[in-house]
Amino acid sequence: MKTNVDLNSPSVFSSVVFRPDFNDFKKINATQAWSLFFTGGREGKALGLSPTAGRFYNLSLFIIAIAGGILWTFLLRPF
């Protein structure tokens, strides 16, 4: 069996964001951005290609920020 993988290439084991084909100003969706964040820039497809996961993480972050603001406003603000 023959594969097309070149393990001698220096970009194989480097981060995705430092590969020459990544920096072509292509748009990435939220799922790919979160995948790069969670893997430290190593894999852009770790969460899959569906935009659902990206929406979930974006909304979760937004809800946490809103809940923190409400908590600080009504419960923790010094009177």
Image: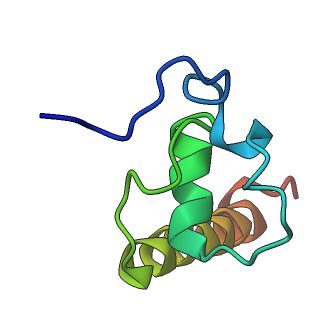
Residue drawn at (55%, 17%) of the image: 8
- Tell me the quarter of the image containing the N terminus: top left
**Residue sitting nearer the eye, 52 or 41:** 41
Where residue 30 appears, as percent x and y from the top left, is 59, 73
Horizontal side of residue 5 vs 78, given as left or right: left
Residue 76 in the image: above or below residue 28: above
Q: Nearer the viewer, residue 46 or 53?
A: 46
Residue 18 place in picture, x, y as percent: 78, 38
Q: Residue at x 53, y 78 (%)?
A: 59
Against 31, residue 36 (above or below) is: above
Furthest toward the left, the residue is 1
- Percent of width and height locating residue 3: 27, 38
Q: Quadrant of the C terminus?
A: bottom right
Which residue does the image show at 76% across and 74% down from the upper left?
A: 26
Q: How many marks?
A: 0
Q: Is residue 34 above or below residue 63?
A: above
Q: Where does residue 63 sit, x and y in percent of width and height?
A: 56, 74
